[in-house]
Amino acid sequence: MTPYGSFSFFIIIAFLLAPAVILGLKGKKFHSYNIFATVIALAIIFSSSFSESVALIAFTIWQVLLIKAYIAYRKKANSGTVFCLAVIFSILPLTISKLLPYFNQSNWVGFLGISYLTFKGTQLIMETRDGLIKKDISIIRLLYFILFFPTISSGPIDRFRRFDKYMEAEITQEQYKLLLYDGINKIFRGFLYKFIIGYSINHYFIANLGFISQSSFQDHLLYMYGYSMYLFFDFAGYSNFAIGVSYIMGVKSPENFNSPFISRNIKDFWNRWHMSLSFWFRDYVYMRFIFWITKKKWIKNRNSISNLGYILLFLLMGVWHGLEIQYIAYGIYHALLMVLYNSFERFNKKHKWWPQNKFTHVIAIIITFHFVCFGFYIFAGQLIK
Amino acid sequence: MINKCKAFLSNYKVKWFGRFIYYLLILLLLFFMYGFNDASAGSYIYNDF
């Protein structure tokens, strides 16, 4: 059963979380019940596919063993080679799952949400290496973090230390009441985005573009804007459901969107769009790359290092979406935009060519919006397939 | 005038009523679009990644 894909899923979740709501409103601890609810929800989500269930169990055992082993190792030593091996082993199932279809093999490794679970596992290894996670994590806490069902299929990608804080915190009746209201509000916004606006854009606009548009160019242009809106309302709708259900379970999962279509520039856009993923790539790819190159002193020019970091980040992000040419092109396109914007920002700091006022702010939003929509046009596979 | 509007909108009862209408509208739209059938809004784009 697809999470948040049908009304029956919401009815099941409402029944499943009713005891958690009652416990929360009475000011009692409810995380033990939520762990039980997570097991039931996972069984419901994966019940339709035996192979995916087996893959999920195998993947979870693999990640837990790896994380536990690395935490134990890190207490004694801190070798870079062991760290690299741990990261490679952590992303290995995801890599195999992405590659198998290209070798005409059935994807026996993949399951719904493998990417997002991998991001969580790899993050734990990286934070252990950085000394941010020092104490041993109980198996139950680790499993609950990795398999937290509201965000299992497509995030948002939470950080362990954040998640752990909510596990430790004692939520009062008043605090839970606010969380519940916010959660319900987000779920309703999710219905508005996914089931009303997103559905209408896809079924009444995109599907009828052949009748609406007068020429091939107009067809492509309308598709570009229509698909951009559809992608936003589809994914933001999902995110609202996932975050709303998390709130009801007493965990404030991070936000994924912050009005991305009013971004002033491409950098601003990536601070507003699919935030939990872009922040993950920023912290664990870009920052590490910058730190590593600076330490090795291979390149001295800071601007060049930063540009190389952006190229690496967006290429990886593109490849993560898939090895199809449109995803790689999407990554290259955004890398290029970031490099160009980086250069423009430096130029503008010196020459004050683009003034900061309300008018230029609006113009910047309009320009960014069109560049972003063209990116989604590439992403949709309409420019190159 | 603006302050009066702000005070009116921040009134608890107005807020509660506004939210009630907002939820009701969403539920009505869902009912008009899907009736008593289970939703068929399609899978999520990002579930594929």
Image (tube, coloured by chain):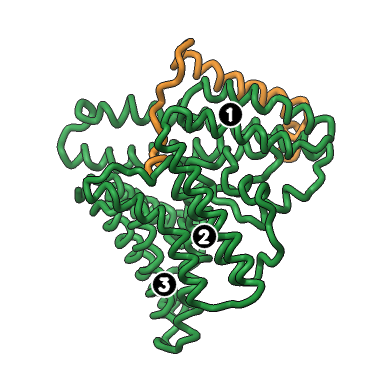
Q: Chain of mark 1?
A: A
Front residue of this view, candidates A266 and A167: A167
Per the rendering, the colour in which chain B appears is orange
Q: Chain of mark 3?
A: A
- Give how far across and how far down residue A262 sits, in percent: 48, 50
Label 3 residue SS: helix
Q: Chain of mark 2?
A: A
Looking at the image, is mark 2 or mark 1 earlier in the sequence?
A: 2
Looking at the image, is mark 2 or mark 3 earlier in the sequence?
A: 2
- Give how far across and how far down residue A255 sits, in percent: 58, 47
- Give how far across and how far down residue A110 sits, in percent: 39, 44
Q: Is residue A224 above or below residue A352?
A: above
- Identified by mark 2, the residue type is Thr
Q: Is residue A275 visible?
A: no
Q: Badge 2 is on which residue?
A: A122
Q: Is residue A22 above or below residue A72?
A: above
Residue at x 57%, y 60% (from the top left corner): A67
* Side of A146 relative to A339 (left or right): right
Per the rendering, the colour in which chain A appears is green
Q: CA distance from mark 2 to mark 3?
A: 19 Å
Q: Using the image, tell me which numbered label, if any, was put on residue A212.
A: none
The part of the image, by quadrant, that contains residue B12 is top right
Q: Is residue A115 visible?
A: yes
Residue at x 69%, y 53% (from the top left corner): A138
Q: Counting other residues with Cα less than 10 Å from the Cα at mark 3, is it few (<14), some (14-19), or many (20 or more)? A: many
Q: Counting other residues with Cα less than 10 Å from the Cα at mark 1, is it few (<14), some (14-19), or many (20 or more)? A: many
Q: Badge 1 is on which residue?
A: A188
Q: Using the image, tell me which numbered label, if any, was put on residue A309.
A: 3
Q: CA distance from mark 2 to mark 1?
A: 33 Å
Nearer to us: label 2 or label 3: 2
* Side of A179 relative to A118 (left or right): right
Q: Are marks 2 and 3 in contact (CB under 8 Å)?
A: no
